[in-house]
Structures are given as C-alpha cells and as structure tokens.
Image: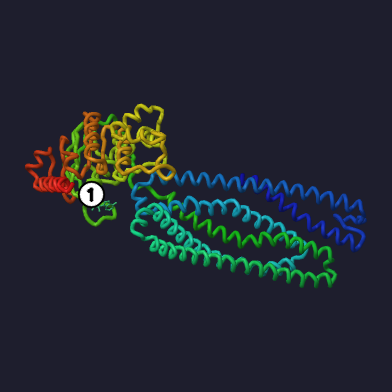
Amino acid sequence: MLLLGMAALFMVDFLQLIIPNLYQMVINGMNRGVVEVNGQILAFDLTFLLDRICMPMVGIILAIVFGRFLWRAMFFGAAIRVEAQLRNEMFDNARRLSCEYYQVNKVGNLMSLFTNDLDTVQECFGWGIMMFLDTLLMGVLAIVKMWRMDSVLTLLSLIPMAFLLASATVVGRYMMMKWDVRQEAFSKLSDFSQESFSGIAVIKAFVKEAKELIAFKCLNLENEKANIDHTRASVLLRILVTMFVESVICVILGYGGYLVFQGRFNAGELVEFIGYFNAVVWPIMAVSELIDMTSRGKASLERISELLDAEPVVRDRQDAADLINPQGEIRFQSLTFRYPDGEQNVLTDITVEIGAGEQVGLVGKTGAGKTTLVDLLLRIYNVEDGMILLDGKDINSLTIESVRNAFAYVPQDNFLFSDTIARNIAFGNNGDVSDMEKIELAAQMADVNDNIREFSSGFETVLGERGITVSGGQKQRISIARALMKDAPVLILDDSVSAVDSKTEKAILQNLRQIRKGKTTILIAHRISTIQQMDKILYLENGHLAAAGNHLQLMESCAGYRRMVELQQLEEEGGENHV
Ligand code: ADP
C-alpha cells in the first residue's frame, strides 16, 4: 500500500511541477505573441491556448485529483491497519504479562497507551510518512527545475532553508521532550480519574469530593502546563518556518528582478521560477508539522514499545511439560517466599502435604499469608524449585496453563464482568452458555439460584456498570458458581463465604462437601465454623505453619488456634446477647 501511495504521490508532484511552465508560456505568449516550445517558435493564438495550455491543464488537474485520492487512500489505509495491528499486539502482550506488571503500571496509564499514544502513532504513520515523502519528492523535483533555470538564484534561495533545517532540528528535539512530559502528565490525570470514578462511593462516604477536586485540579494544571510548553515550541517552529519562507521570497524577487533587469531572465521565466518555489513552500511548511508529528510519534511509540517489550515475569520453562490428568495432590516443601518488592519473608519454611481429594481449611489472622500461599499455587508469583509439588511434580517444571487449568479459584475480590449472570457463571466453562442446566446447577450449589430467579431478567440480568449492582454476598456466591462450573481437580475459595449469613454458609458448605467429594478443596476462612468440619486444617501464624491437623487435634495441640476459637466463640456469644 505504501509503495502504491508513493507512486501516486510521485505522479501528483511531477504533474504539479508542469503547471509553472504553462504559466511561463502564457505570460511570454501574451508579451511577445509567440512561444518557444522545445526550440520551436509557435504563434500564441487560440489554437495554441486550447491545445497546449487548456487541454493539458484539464488532463493534469484530473490526474492530480485521482492521484491525491489514491495516495490518501493508500497512506491512511496503511496507517489504520498499522494502528489496528499494533493495538492487537499490545493487547496480546498485555494479557500475557504477570500480575506484578499490573501492580506497578496503573490502569489509567495503560488506557492512555491504548488511546492517546496509539492515535499519535497512527497520525504519524499516515500523515507523517506522506509529508516526509512529499517534502522529499517535491523538494528535490522543484529544486532540480529551479537549478536548471538559474543555479545562483537557487543557491541563494536555499541558504535560508539550511538555517531553517538547523533550527527546526533543535526545536524538534525540545518538542519531543515536552511531548513526553505531556503524555506522562496525561497518564497521571487518566490514572487519577479512573481511580476516582472507581472509588466514588468511598469518596462520597468520606465527603472528600472537594479534596479530590483540588487534587484533580493540581494534576490538570500540570497537564495544562505541559501542553502549553509543547504548544509554545510548536508555535515557535511555525513562526521560524514562515520567516524563512518569506525571506526566500524576498531573495527571489530581489535577485530575480535584477536578472530580469539585466535581460538574463524574462518575466515569464521569473513567474515560472516563483511557481516552482511556491510548489516547495508547502513541503517546507510541512517540515515543521513533520518534526512536530515525528517528535510526538516517537515519544508515544517509545511508551508503547515499553509495553510491547515487557516480558512476563512468570513464564514457562523451555522444557516445561503439561500436567496430565491432575489428581490434586499438593506438597509444600520448605516453602519460603518473599514478594519481589518485599523486605521480609511472607511465608517461612512451610512443609505440609495436601492429599488428593482432601478437604482443607486454611486459617490464620489477616496478613498471615493465606492468600499468598494460594497465589503461589496458581503461579501468580515465582517460587524456587522444589518448594511446591503437584502430583509429585515440581510446579516449575509444569506449564503454567496446565497448572492453572487444574484449579478453580474464587478470588477474594470476586470480580465479575459487566455481562449477564449466565455468562459470568459460564466464564468458568469457556463462556459456553448453551448448557443452562449446568449453569443453574452451579448457581444452586452456590445457593444463589433463588436470588437470581428474583431478578426480572433472571440469568440474563446484566451486572456491573451497565446493569444492576448485586450485594457483596450475591457477588461472592455468583463467583463460587463460576468456579464450580469448572469442576477442576482442585477448588480454592479465598474467604468466599464471609459476606453471607450463617444459614447460607451452612448450605453452601453442605453442597460443597457433596459435590467436591473425592476432589481436593482448599477453603480459606476467618470463621472457625466455616472450616471446622474439614479433613485437615492448616493454621498459619505470621507466615509460619503453626499447626496442621483436624479441628480436635489442633484444639489440643495448638494454643494459638485454641485462642482463636475461644475468641470467636466469645464474639458470637457477645453478638447473640447483644441481639
Ligand atoms: P492473608 O490472606 O492471610 O490475609 P496475605 O497473603 O494477603 O495474607 O498477605 C500476607 C502478607 O504479604 C501481608 O503482610 C501483606 O502485606 C503482604 N503482601 C500481600 N500482597 C503483597 C504484594 N503484592 N506485595 C508485597 N507484599 C504483599
């Protein structure tokens, strides 16, 4: 497409440079009554005007119109394709990146890459390439024609142009720097807006609207200042260009007039020379635009490249094998873990085995390391070799996909998509909503079926931004239904029944016992009552495994566990007395 566009552009430029020659013929014809064409002297009459001026002019104009259409279609078409492909590649890499990347890079920043920066690159690719080629082609062609007419006049005209290029390069560098600052400021603004809108309920509850507004205004001011700096440089560049172009006109009129006065140039030739120069004015003007555009495009492309070049921290080893027919047997072997940016170990020397089909409860105070432990199982972070074994195989020797496929997970934040409830639940099963019976069964097992039936659109109810908001407990249960849809060898529930009442909790636990019989289930909970019945309870204290065993064993052997149970009993009794 670019080659075809270039050919069309070349044709247009070539034809445009024939027009000044026609001017010359008309003016000289009017002055002298005869015209010299390729050494022949012809009479300047109506036939000449029609055959040699008007007809070719019509042909040239038609061809120019067609050529312009063609290069626009080709250059802009190519730019749109490049943008679409780049966007796909960006998304493709973004989805492969580890969670760590998203903890450092905020959503607002990423969004501005996908909108603002991508637009800039697209503009640079379409308009930018076109302008660059046009400047080059038209500039060279016109200068050659000018040179043929009078080399001294051409050289004199080019001197201001050299100054222009030198100063434009310096200003261009400065503009690129300023664009980078501007994009950073815009990213910050977009991060801030995104967070404010997401946390609007908290902001309102704490009556912090005014504080938010002031913070927003500060960021916006930063953005405005960066914008003004960039625009100032851009205006300066434009003024420089205009100044140099005007000074060339002075040179041509001055020295060209002198040549006419000396008889070395006639009036028609001077008009022709000015015509050629006029043809280069636009490309020269475009130089400033081009420098502005490429400086912005380069800065944006660098930001995009950072995303494209970012490597996932957690990735498959070259010799990684798939976990085939997983049984759900898990072994932690002296597992010690520290977050990449952390200062101390979050988990220390954990050694325990979870047998295939075992129902395991994971308890401990907030911050004890429960979520971290299951995150490591799901390979959200890297662990050292030999510290976690799945079915007897080192987790690092297995492919991430096959490991994650062996798990169904109910995360703590219960994120649901802005989609129908049916699709949200079916997400656990490749998003296939054709088997409504299975979806309903999963909802029943998560004890949320009745709630869903009460919504006027039932399972077709749209959740989230575009639809209704469900309660925390309903969210948790839809999230559980989604995980149950997967029917994986290992099910992990991270504090997933904390927002439901004890009757519902009992029903869900009862269902889980029934459908997860013989399949490994790990339940993280705060309430002892939730995990009391489990085959095995792991009690974590400050990242250490303080005890492992069933409820009765822990009550006997682990003072920390016993204290926790007693405290919770007291709390419950206190709550009941209070009621
Ligand atoms: P629990 O699930 O038992 O409440 P977590 O596993 O969430 O505990 O957290 C254990 C510890 O790890 C806490 O001290 C917490 O501050 C820290 N932590 C959690 N996530 C991160 C993270 N992404 N980076 C650094 N430290 C973290």
Query: Residue 225: horizontal and vertical position, in percent?
Result: 49, 67
Q: How many numbered tags mark residues here?
A: 1
Q: Is residue 391 visible?
A: no
Query: Does residue 193 lie above or below 527 as drawn?
Result: below
Please, which colouring scheme is shown? rainbow
Q: Is residue 166 left or right of residue 219?
A: right
Where is 454 relative to 471, above or below?
Answer: above
The one nearer the camera, 125 or 156, is 125
Circle 1 residue = 337
Say which residue appears at 77% left-offset and 72% top-offset. 254
Q: Residues within 10 Å of mark 1 (few under 14, many from 20)?
A: many
Q: Quadrant of residue 354?
A: top left
Question: In the image as oriented, which residue stretches furthest toward the left?
Answer: 556
Name the outermost residue toward the front. 579
- Looking at the picture, does residue 329 appear above or below residue 43? above
* Residue 480 position within the rendered picture, expressed as x and y whole percent measured from the top left: 30, 37
Q: What residue is drawn where x is 16% and y is 40%?
A: 537
Amino acid at dot 1: Phe
Front-lying residue, 523 or 296 = 523
Pick the front one: 122 or 217: 217
From the top left corner, tell me how far across and down residue 531 is, in percent: 18, 39
- Is disc 1's CB within 8 Å of ligand 1? no
Q: Secondary structure at mark 1?
A: strand
Q: Nearer the viewer, residue 573 or 340?
A: 573
Quadrant containing the N terminus in the rendered view: top right
Place of residue 560 in the rendered image (x, y in percent of width and height, measured from the top left): 11, 48
Query: Where is residue 341, by image quadrant?
Result: bottom left
Vertical placement of residue 161 versus 468, above or below: below
Q: Is residue 217 left or right of residue 522?
A: right
Q: Answer with left or right where residue 379 lies relative to residue 77.
A: left
Whether residue 359 can be seen here: yes
